[in-house]
Image (cartoon, helix red, strand yellow):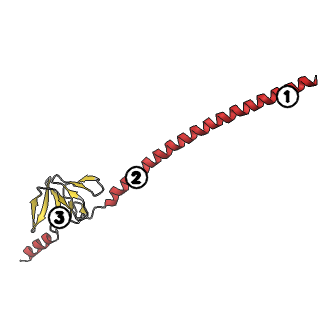
Amino acid sequence: SADSTGGSMMMSNTAEGTMMMKNGKMMVMKSGTWTAMDQPMMCADSCKVMPDGQVIMKDGEKMTLKEGESIANDGMMMDATGKMMDMKMDMGSKMVDTAGKMMDSANKMMDKATDKMKEAGEKMKDAGNKMVDQAKDKAKDAADKMK
């Protein structure tokens, strides 16, 4: 009966309440057997798992479990090979998106600053030209007086 122990040990590796996408359906581990998931379930980490496999994180972010992926009732996700899924990958892509948006904002601010500097440069050039014109007029007046 080493086989049956091996089988039951395999089952005991899957914690009660674990949810998995199997054959396109969300299944839940209940009393050692996979049962169809018929209603949304909350995980201890406050994420919500829907019967269609959609997982709504506590920050409102959504993802959908793919075939063989699972989520334990503590919110720990695993890929189809049973390896812990790196949620940092998700976080990383969010950070890249955020960084991209920040760069866009920074570029817009730089464009505005450049425009303002061009405007200021034009004003200074105009003021400089006026000063040169006034100096020319004064020099001409002085030259006329010397005649």
In the displayed structure, 75 sits above or below 94; it is below
Q: Where residue 33 sits in the image (x, y, percent)?
A: 9, 65
Q: Is residue 126 left or right of residue 45?
A: right
Tag 2: Cα neighbours inside 10 Å, few (<14), some, or many (≥20)?
Answer: few
Q: Position of residue 70 (x, y in %)?
A: 20, 61
- Residue depth check, mark 3 versus mark 1: number of the one nearer the observer: 1
Question: Of the residues under marks 3 and 1, which one precedes in the sequence?
Answer: 3
Q: Please tell me how many numbered marks the rendered image carries.
A: 3
* Element under disc 3: loop
**In the displayed structure, would residue 54 be above or below residue 29?**
above
Give neighbour class at mark 3: few <14, some 14-19, many 20+ (Cα, 10 Å).
many
Tell me which residue sits at (56%, 42%) in the image: 113
Q: Amino acid at mark 2?
A: Val
Q: Residue furthest bottom?
A: 1
Q: CA distance from mark 3 to mark 2?
A: 31 Å
Q: Point out which mark residue 96 bears.
A: 2
What residue sits 28% from the left and 58% below the top? Answer: 58
Dot 1 or dot 2, earlier in sequence = 2
Image position, residue 61 (x, y; %): 29, 53
Q: Which mark is residue 18?
A: 3
What's the amino acid at mark 1? Ala
Give the left or right position of residue 145, taking residue 87 as reference: right
| Mark sitting on residue 78 | none
Q: Which residue is mark 1?
A: 139
Residue 134 percent across, percent down from the top left: 78, 29
Task: Give the Cα distance between marks 3 and 1.
Answer: 93 Å
Task: Tell me if mark 1 has few (under 14), some (14-19) or many (20+) residues whose alpha carbon lies within 10 angstroms of its own.
Answer: few
Mark 3 or mark 2, earlier in chain: 3
Quarter-of-image position of residue 72: bottom left
Instruction: Kindly state the secondary structure of the residue where label 2 is placed.
Output: helix
What amino acid is labelled 3 in the image?
Thr
Q: Nearer the viewer, residue 66 or 51?
A: 51
